[in-house]
Image (spheres, rainbow, N blue to C red):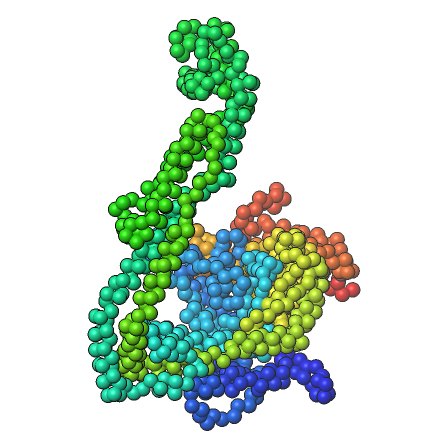
Amino acid sequence: MAENTSTKSPNGQADTLESAIKKFANELPYWSKFLAERRLSGWGISDEEIDTAYVCLMEQLGLLEKTERPEITVNYNPDSARRHKGDLVFAKLENVEGVNALVEGQKLEFGPNLTIIFGSNGSGKTGYTRLLKQVFHSKSREEILPNVHIAAGHKPVGANFLFVSGTTKISLTLKDRARAEFEQFSVFDGKSVICHLDQKNEFEFRPAGLSFFGEMSAAIGQVEKKLETELTFLKNSSTPQDLSALFDGESEIKTAVIEINANTKKEALNKYTPFSDEDKQQQSQKNKNHDDLLVASKNTEKEIKHLENLKKLITDNKTSIDTLNRFFSTNALEKINKTIEDYLEKEAIAKAEGSQKFQSETILDIGTDEWKQFILSAEKFAKTQKSGDTNYPEDGDYCILCQQLLTREAQSLIDDYWAFIKSLAEENARGALNVLEKIVITFEELKFDLLPEDNVLVVWMNDNYPARLKEIKHGLKEQHTLRNKILTSLREKKPFASEQFQTTLRHHQDIESEIESKIKIVKNNDLLRELEKLKKEKTFLDHKEKFNSNISKFESCLIDQQWIHMAGKANFKKAKTDVTNAEKSLSDKYFNQKYIDEFNKECHNLNGNFGIEIAHTGSAGKSYRQLKLKGKNPHAVLSEGEQKVIAIADYLVETRLSEANRGLIFDDPVNSLDEKRKSEIARRIVVESSSKQTIIFTHDLIFLSSLIGHCGDLNVEHSCHWIENRGGNPGQVWLNNSPSYEREYRNAELARNLYTEAAKFDCSPSNREYLIRSGFACLRTSYEVLVIHELFGSVVQRFNERVSIDALSKVHFDRQLIDQLQDSFAQCCRHMEGHTHSDKYAYKKPEPNDLNSEIKRFDDIKAKIRKVAKQ
């Protein structure tokens, strides 16, 4: 695509992609403009350029002293910036080693237009394609495996690639795959189809100017990474928080160190320097005064600790009694009585609905708890007498107590027992009983011995608050008595009449307040205040001494913080966003719509107008496209054949709009397509090959014939090679061979060459016979081609589904000529090895003169057909 595609600006001058790129680059900051100028001038961006741009950025941020630098004016010349060769041809592939099981010592030659490599499945085409996908552009690169049929002796992958540009030959190897020559060819295969249809694809081939933005974004990223490396190092160095660990205790100096940041003035640190002789004398005196006063204050500190411990003990005891009081509140006692009443009510219902029918004069206490427990235990034991789905009792079972055979009446009674156990009323009664039992356990576990005689708190209260201690103990004793009364009621399941009882907590609160007051009085002692004052003064002087002995660390930390702050002003996000936005804007203006138009045109050429839409996105200075069909991936909607048509259209457009791409490589592009589609794609590829080198690997004879046919129709030069698997060795190349190479049989030249060899004086009899028979075989094929192209005027061709109705006027149906042609064809068959000969023609050993006579006869018949055609 032309680089200088233009539009009109508001001032009437022509805007071009070139001028827009220059304008964008010239408006960049100096450091990034330097990178843009190097890229657009054709020099490229090396590590050295990244280092220079980084230094320029540091100067811009004020992190380095500014130096005199020359003004930069971007004069973009697309030709000087272009790395690629416009006349590059991929001429030869040879010395292939270590690629799957491909036989070594082969070579493939490629013409400037169309080159066809034919081979059946398993012949080695895929191996060559995988190699080409490794070095050329491909959306589906594959790993190259060694020969799996041998256990050892694998060679590394290797190959030689010969390119030609003008009169210059360029020989490269796999080690040179970073060379620009490899960027100018692209491979399309079946695996690429899904990539074209399902993925968001980068525009790999675009105008050279637009590729500038992706490279520019990458270069900015390199400068950013360089700065991030330095920032990471500084951030992992000594931080203000780290340096504050040098100081024990607290002081304004330590606070100042913690608060060091980019805005800190150096004067704020200098106010703590120097640590003078006077400071040393003060420090010594303060230390002595502090130590002396500390000895004198030891008893005071001991008293404070004693009081604080007592306060904690009284607080803990208050919490324990408060917890105990909750169990003896009015609300708690009412809940217990309601629980007992609930049980009694449910128990009465259970008796009324169940146990009454079991009353008997012979057994006492039916319906009591003991009776129920007996029935429950019996049921559990009865379950152990049976296995599976059977239940006890059944006919023939014995009593689990008396071991007597159970009667029908006894079985019925036991069944009634089991039913009683499972009844809802009984279940409710059991549930209520469980609640009562849990309450019993809770009250049994309550602890009332909260003030034992040997307790430190009790001893102290006996000395200081004996009356209050006595009242608290009395309250706990009363609660203990009430607890026992409640337990009796719970066990007997009888409601009780009792009011709440709470052990008073006011004494605890009063004692806490009095202890707190004593602590304040002790702490307000002038001795402690003076000690605290001396401690602060001593700490300040200790910190000042430490600060001055480490002043270089604090100054370095301040410089680092200021450097980090100033470096943070480098807005790489904006720089990369500006690049991406510029690329997107110019792509929309100069490329994207053209791509869409060309894609639609290509779909039309390939009869693939399926309603495909193209969405464009941009990121990191690159453009991407996504094919959609009614909002869905085409792969999920189109048939396999339709998918290939769309993928090929996308591939052809992308490579055609490229200034760099010089060659297309297809690997079996028409698999699963019908003959009509094959012919359409063959013609389209042949048209493309007239202006761009094209290489096709195929196993499809119809496609091969169609390609050759279209080459003839469009007068496009082509060559064809044959790949075979011989003896389990794939990749055997036969240059200029084809299973349908009819052009060589349009005359008798092949047969004439064989006659010349056979007629030589030193030709052995066996070899002469072989050459003669081969000559007749060639002549026989020439007759077949003569019928197709001369007699029938190419109305119907070999491997071509198209019937040319327009060519019917060229058909020459002369009975006498047809008889001569049939007779000559039969003569050829007569002398060919491997044919069954009719009775009309008895077989005899052919001589060179026989072959020569038939060659002359062929030329004569061909001349007569052409003569008739001119009439």
375 on left or right of 353 = left
- Looking at the image, residue 854 sits to the left or right of residue 466; the answer is right
Spot occupied by residue 585 in the image (x, y as percentages of width and height): 64, 76
Q: Nearer the viewer, residue 453 or 92?
A: 453
| Residue for point 58% across, 61% down | 199
Total numbered labels: 0
Picture coordinates of residue 389 (x, y %)?
48, 19
Q: Residue at x 45, y 87 (%)?
A: 62
- In the image, 711 versus 466, the foreground residue is 466
Q: Is residue 104 visible?
A: yes
> In the displayed structure, would residue 258 be above or below residue 722?
below
Quadrant the C terminus occupies: bottom right
Look at 55% across and 90% down and name the residue there: 73
Along the line of sight, which residue is nearer the eye, 586 or 735?
586
| Location of the N terminus (image quadrant) | bottom right
Q: Position of residue 512 (x, y in %)?
A: 37, 56
| Quadrant in which residue 262 is drawn | bottom left
Is residue 781 visible in the rendered image? The answer is: no
Q: Residue furthest front?
A: 467
Name which residue lies at 32% across and 45% down. 451
Query: Looking at the rendering, which quadrant does residue 192 occupy?
Result: bottom right
Residue 866 x/y as whole percent: 72, 63
Does residue 326 appear left or right of residue 190 in this picture?
Answer: left
